[in-house]
Amino acid sequence: MTRVLRAHLAEFSEGADGRVFYGVRGGELPNITYRRAWRKARKDAFTADQFASPLAERPYDLRHACVSTWLNAGVPATQVAEWAGHSVEVLLKTYAKCISGQDEVARRRISAALDTGDCSW
C-alpha cells in the first residue's frame, strides 16, 4: 500500500490543501467517487455472498470495526476514545454493546492483582 501511495503522489502530487486524493478542481472528492471505488473494491475482494451482505458496506464501517476490535482487544476505553476522537461517554454509549468475551480476562487480572497484594485501587 505504501508503494501504491508513493506512486500516486509521484504522479499527482498532493492537493493544495494537503489532500492525497482530491477532486478534479481540488478539494474533496465527491461522495459518488468514493462509493463507486468502494463498491468495486468490495466486489474484487469479497466472495459473492460477502459482497451481497452488509459486511463493510460503507468505508465508515471500517472505523466501527476498528474501534470495536480495539475495545475487544482490551485497549482501555480512555485510549480508544482518544485514538477515535471521541469522549469516553460517546465511545461507550456507541460501542459498549460490541464489547464481548472479556469476562475471563478481567477476572484473571483481578485475581492476579489480589494475589500480588496490589490493592492500589
Image: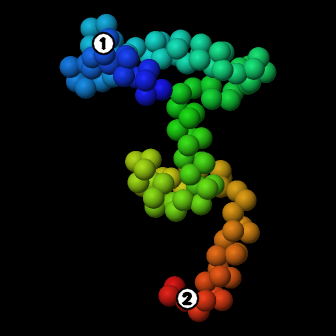
From this view, report whether residue 75 is shown above or below residue 53.
Answer: below
Can residue 27 be seen here? The reply is: no
Crowd tier of the residue under label 2, counting other residues whose Cα lies within 10 Å: few below 14, some 14–19, many 20 or above: few
* 33, above or below 5, in the image: above
Query: Seen in the image, is 18 located left or right of residue 1?
Result: left
Residue at 75 percent of width and 20 percent of height: 47
In the rendered image, residue 71, in percent from the top left (x then y), is placed at: 58, 55
Q: What's the residue type where badge 2 is placed?
A: Asp
- Taking the spot 37% from the left edge, 16% from the top edge, the residue there is 8
Image location (x, y in percent) of residue 115: 66, 89
Question: Percent position (x, y) of residue 56?
Answer: 63, 29
25 is higher (above) or lower (below) than 74: above
Binning the other alpha carbons within 10 Å of mark 1 as few (below 14), some (14 to 19) or many (20 upward) gives few
The residue nearer to you, when weighing 45 against 25, is 45
Disc 1 residue type?
Phe
Q: Which residue is mark 1?
A: 12
> Measuring 31% from the left and 7% from the top, which residue is drawn there?
24
Q: Residue furthest front?
A: 3
Question: Marks 1 and 2: in contact by CB < 8 Å?
Answer: no
C-alpha distance separating marks 2 and 1: 57 Å
63 sits left or right of 3 in the view: right
| Mark 1 secondary-structure assignment | helix
Q: Residue reaching furthest left?
A: 16
From the image, tell me which residue sits under label 2.
Answer: 118
- Residue 60, position as x, y percentages in the image: 52, 32
Labels 2, 1: front one:
1
The earlier-in-sequence mark between 2 and 1 is 1
Label 2 sits on a secondary structure element that is loop
